[in-house]
Image: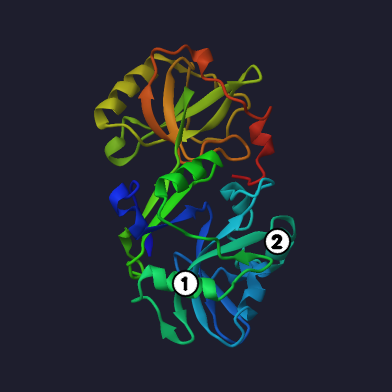
Amino acid sequence: MLATPGSLPPASQDARWAYETKQDGQRTVAYLNGDGSVLLRARSGEDITAAYPELGPLGRALGTTPAVLDGEVLALDERGRASFQLLQRRMGLAHAPARAARRAAQVPVHLVLFDVMHLGGRSLIALPYAQRRQRLEELGLHGPHWSTPAAIVGHGAQALAATREHGLEGLVCKRLDSVYEPGVRSRAWIKIRNMRSEDVLVGGWLPGKGRLTGLPGAVLVGQRAGGALRYVGSVGTGWSEAERSELAALLAELATDVCPFDPVPAVRGAHWVVPRLVGEVRYSVRTRSGMLRQPSWLRLRPDLAPEDAAADLPDDPLDRDPGGA
């Protein structure tokens, strides 16, 4: 079951909803077979069990009781916050168990559980969320690499404010009477992502494809730090077609053969421009290397000078990227 992007339910309906922290990880369904084994599947249906060997003991957590659980695999940073950048070091190793075991020692994962769809051979998907949640909490699933974080009923505005205060990805709102709808992106679950915005300098662009042929498909943006323009990512969404055409004309006037970023990013097919255009972008979080995650374009900022697009970045963020992204 998937959540639909949206906003907080009306205050008059607040008590009809539960609120859970939105986690930045890999969505996972865990099948506990009742024989001590566990099978982990990603949203795609891929078997990812071997990628996370430290979650193997979860198969014994309920003894001989079989269960199907919904959750998210996380990698936590030094502040205890979910880091997708760290998790990328663990993903994609389902067919390389030896490497997965070595990475598990370096970057252990944690599985947060938030729903139970089957228990003891009985399907629970037709039960309302409130009852499924109660069953899940009664299981007492708290271990060295898994837990069942609390859900709050009501107080949605306070819950959302708390996620922003602590720099968390966002909030998921779940209607208390909602059944579990496998594979459905439902309005009974609403996700709210905490987005931030910053000013950036445009230093290059990538050509568009298909209907965007002849227009910029994405712009390459950076921020000044330590006397240099540091590359912080590519932005490919947020424009109308007319705005892309306007941007294309501005980029053509600033064309140069010299890359303005230091160090030069490994971006194939890039066209460089003199970094004079300031824009505002929205994004979810920064990676540990200083890159903007999920950026989208908000607007040009002709009112700002290029030197205004500065940020507190590592001296050489590209060399400090632990995720190898």
Tell me if residue 280 can be seen.
yes
Q: Is residue 317 left or right of residue 113?
A: right
How is the protein colored in the picture?
A: rainbow
| Picture layout, residue 115 above or below residue 283 | below
User: The disc labelled 2 sits on which kind of residue?
Assistant: Ala
Closer-to-camera residue (220/139): 139
**Which disc is residue 283 wearing?**
none
Task: Tell me the quarter of the picture where residue 316 sits.
Answer: top right
Closer-to-camera residue (209/239): 239
| Between marks 1 and 2 in the image, the one whose residue lies nearer the viewer | 1
**Which disc is residue 134 wearing?**
1
Tell me the SS state at disc 1.
Answer: helix
The picture places residue 238, in percent across and down from the top left corner, at 34, 34
The picture places residue 202, in percent across and down from the top left corner, at 46, 23
The picture places residue 273, in percent across and down from the top left corner, at 46, 19
Cβ atoms at labels 1 and 2 below 8 Å apart: no
Most extreme residue toward the left is 242
| Picture layout, residue 18 above or below residue 143 | above
Q: Is residue 117 left or right of residue 177?
A: right
User: The disc labelled 1 sits on which kind of residue?
Assistant: Gln
The picture places residue 50, in percent across and down from the top left corner, at 62, 70
Task: Tell me the quarter of the picture where residue 17 sits.
Answer: bottom left
Q: How many marks?
A: 2
Look at mark 2 in the image and give the residue it sits on: 104
Tell me if residue 189 can be seen.
no
Mark 2 crowd level (few <14, some 14–19, many ≥20, 10 Å Cα): some
Tell me the SS state at disc 2.
Answer: helix
Label 1, label 2: how many angstroms apart (C-alpha)? Answer: 31 Å
> What residue sits 51% from the left and 65% below the top?
71
Q: Is residue 97 left or right of residue 15?
A: right
> What residue sits 61% from the left and 48% below the top?
81
